[in-house]
């Protein structure tokens, strides 16, 4: 399992999933995470809404949620400094969401909401 980070680049001048600029999905790979993204939000994260803006999302694969959020939790001027723990990051920011599989039920759970 990996964690895929979807960062909304506001292609065409608007956010594609209301209220969620940063979305993290636990999956085997980027393809699986993209399929899950479509199922969850009815939005294709691989779409390009506006050619001049480029892709709608920056999509990257990481080994776990700590690695996937490391840049977003860090000081932009000094990436080695983590300003928030993973827990603080999801508590302090309302435009982020993490979807992970729960082992017992094999259902997706929004760990934020
Ligand atoms: Zn544009």
Image (cartoon, rainbow, N blue to C red):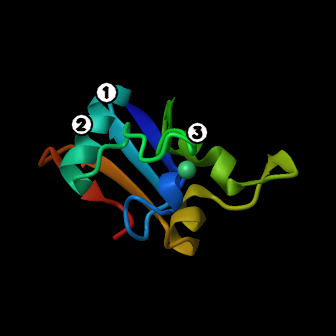
| Residue tagged 3 | 67
> In the rendering, which numbered label is found on residue 18?
none
Ligand 1 within 8 Å of the CB at mark 2: no
Callout 3 crowding tier (Cα within 10 Å): few <14, some 14–19, many ≥20: some
Decide: is 46 above or below 96. above
Q: Position of residue 24 (x, y in %)?
A: 43, 48
| Residue at 57% in and 42% down | 52
Residue 12 seen in the current view: yes
Q: Position of residue 96 (x, y in %)?
A: 48, 62
Mark 2 and 1 residues: CB-CB less than 8 Å, in contact?
yes
CA distance for labels 2 and 1: 6 Å
Badge 1 element: helix
Mark 1 and 3 residues: CB-CB less than 8 Å, in contact?
no
Say left or right for 20 vs 27: right
Upstream in sequence: badge 2 or badge 3: 2
Mark 2 and 3 residues: CB-CB less than 8 Å, in contact?
no
| Residue at 33% in and 52% down | 99
| Residue tagged 1 | 31
> In the rendering, which numbered label is found on residue 35?
2
């Amino acid at each position: 399992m990996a964690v895929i980070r979807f960062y909304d680049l506001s292609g065409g001048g608007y956010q594609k999933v209301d209220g969620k600029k940063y979305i993290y999905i636990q999956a085997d790979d980027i393809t699986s995470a993209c399929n899950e993204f479509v199922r969850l939000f009815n939005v294709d994260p691989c779409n390009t809404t506006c050619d001049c803006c480029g892709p709608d999302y920056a999509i990257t694969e990481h080994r776990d949620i700590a690695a996937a959020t490391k840049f977003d939790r860090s000081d932009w001027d000094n990436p080695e400094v983590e300003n928030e723990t993973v827990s603080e990051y999801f508590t302090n920011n309302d435009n982020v969401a993490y979807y992970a599989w729960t082992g017992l039920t094999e259902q997706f759970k929004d760990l934020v909401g």
